[in-house]
Amino acid sequence: MSTPHLDHVTQRVIGSAFQTICEEMGHTMIRTANSSLFVEGRDFSCAIVDSKAELIAAANYDPSHLSAMALTVEFVVLFFGPDNIFPGDVYLVNDPYRGGGHLPDITLIRPIFASSRLLGYAVNRAHHLDIGGMAVAGFPGTARSVFQEGLRIPPVRWFHKGEENRDIIEFITLNVRFPRDQWGDFQAQLASTQTAERRLLRLAGRYGAEAIDAAMTDVKNHAEQLTRLMIRDLPDGRYGFTEFVDDDGVTDQPRRIEVTITVAGDRMEVDFTGTSPQAEGPVNSSYGNTLSSTFNAILQLLGPDVPFNNGCFRPIEVVVPRGCLLNPAPPAPCFGGVTEVSIRVVDAIMGALAPIASNRIGAGSYGTCINFSGGGYDAERRASYGFYFFIEGGWGACAWRDGWNCTPNPTSNFNDYPVEWIESTLPLRYREVRLHTDSGGPGEWRGGVGTIRTVQLLADSVEINSLGERFVIPPFGLAGGDPGACNALMLRNGSAGEWQTIRQALHTASPSKFNGLHSGRDTWFRMMSGGGGGYGDPLVRPAARVVDDVVQGFVSREAAQADYGVIIVTNPDHSIGYDAEGTEAQRARMRNEPRDRQLARARAVERATAATAGQTLSEEARQTIETTEDRISTTAARLREKLGSESADALGAALRTPFTNARAVKFWDIDSIDRWLQRHADHDVPSEME
């Protein structure tokens, strides 16, 4: 059957409808979910994926999920086989080694059929409050294995041909700490995909299934063309940058993220060769999450006018060696990959492209969610409680504006929990929420500032966990701008106690990664998010603008003089101003002096560079990777010998075998491969192709 030609107007109408359907999926989720994570925080994403398992549209609730959701669909179709996908099926999966990000991100996949024709898949990925494991509400900062992080769910059918297998949800909710709320959240995810199914079928009823297929092809081609135009605007060449993860939670050793970007005409290669080997602690990033982070950075370059779908991916090759921090082998823990390492990947790509795309790129961001979680028993409410705080901070400044203040990090799009909700549902009292003054990196354009949030524990006890970043190495500035301030977690006992860092008070190996620590009633916890890096020389920032920063609470009087050379005065009418003559003299003295913040970051980077030199892969991981790659290459060779290269590659593209699928060969592990071979009796060649 020939593909119908769509006129431009019809194509745009249907393409916009795909995006609207994803947004309506999100509205359904918000209206029907139980947990504040979804109703208030909106830590989920919704997407439509076509019959080839390629992303068509996504609602930008949580950018860390966007690209990886299609990879999860691809894994599910490969695993079950395209002939075993039926109307009325609903699949569940969360495993980071099966296209997922980290364990609490549970993905629901619903195939959508118009009569017997597969139109595509509705996908909802949502971060559940708890997934079992060693940490209440997740984020076990010292996990050494994915098995300690929680329940791993391979691709399973919750519904098969419209019939529910309730045992699936019974099994999952038995293994989490808040089953009632999470059962309701699963129902909300289910309703979200039902919304997509109704809307897509209505669209197909109006325009025809063939027109829907044609529109999906058109939106991908359009996005590809715009992406190639953006790449072509960049000068050809190789550009590199190195970022660091503070530590892995188990040790105090940092990890290196090294990226080299090659621009050649309208194509780009993003190569992470040189990145540290996988870590012992939970800061590894699954292959799917690394792809998502990479395309997240590219999306920021593209801007809002480019529809985000699989077409954006076509001109960009991503190279991620097996066994490195960004493509680990199981059972390496991955909990912090989605929330923390993903931001390091974005910043590394931005740093690499900054010299050639300064009109599109900002300095480093505060770069964390902090991820402060925990729970216990609330005697007053006679119930267990759990909480998960993710904190906004400052973004890096650009060549044309200051960095954003108090904004979710570049891989998130969450909302704050209302104070009223926290105090009415949890044994916590908010003591303060304020700007983190002086956290933004000084520059001609100032980095955005973070926040300071303080809560008081009203229960008898609590178990706390954290998995954060940028507590040691601050975010970089650009073009002479200073770094932003680091993040911090503090506590004190009672209102008169002395503030200490968690590391000082509870003797953790890491300042930002720990789990299972205990504290008692009237403990005060303070979460301090840092700021973004500055852009340009701080001494050329207009003094009047610095005065306004002081008035707004972004910069203190002391920092105005020390960082910007602006001497703040109080005028006779009690307004704030500056001493023009004194400021000119102060700036003249400072012009040849070293910048303290830049020196401090340079020293931190020097220490991290030395510490990451010579890091090697464990023998167990090395042998696992060798076995995996040998199994894939041997089976692929046998397949090509039997069918011919062209037919064998077509099988992979048709999602019938992982051994010649372009993406599967880069990340499928030996367990996934063995399970696939056990499931498919022919062992490598689908019977209908023999």
Image: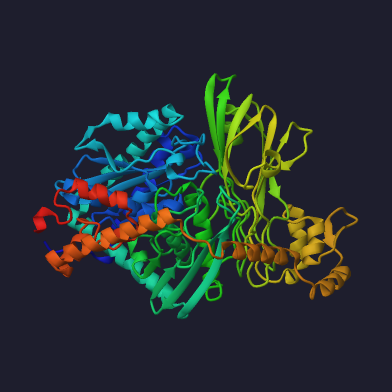
Percent across and percent down for residue 510 are 62, 48
Determine if residue 10 is in view.
no
Question: Where residue 80 sits: x, y (%)?
Answer: 22, 47
Say above or below: 198 vs 136. Answer: below
Q: Residue 35 appears at what percent x and percent y?
A: 47, 34
Furthest residue in direction right, as rendered: 572
**Residue at x 61% of width, y 47% of height:** 512
Residue 651 visible (yes or no): yes
Write down the quadrant of residue 602 in the picture: bottom right
> Is the N terminus in the top left, top right, bottom left or bottom right quadrant?
bottom left
438 left or right, relative to 578: left
Task: Give percent across and percent down for residue 511.
Answer: 64, 47
Residue shown at the point (17%, 46%) measured from the top left: 84
Name, please, the residue furthest toward the front: 619
Q: Nearer the viewer, residue 183 or 299?
A: 183
Vertical placement of residue 562 versus 487, above or below: below
Asked if residue 325 lies left or right of residue 47, the reply is right
Q: Nearer the viewer, residue 329 or 108?
A: 329
Q: In the picture shown, does residue 132 fall above or below 582?
A: above
Give the left or right position of residue 452, taking residue 570 as reference: left
Q: How is the image coloured?
A: rainbow
Figure quadrant of the C terminus: bottom left
**Relative depth, front residue between 623 and 91:** 623
Foreground: 208 or 49?
Answer: 49
Choose top left, top right, bottom left or bottom right for residue 52: bottom left
Number of numbered discs visible in the structure rendering: 0
Q: Residue at x 19, y 42 (%)?
A: 87
Residue 589 vs residue 454: left or right? right
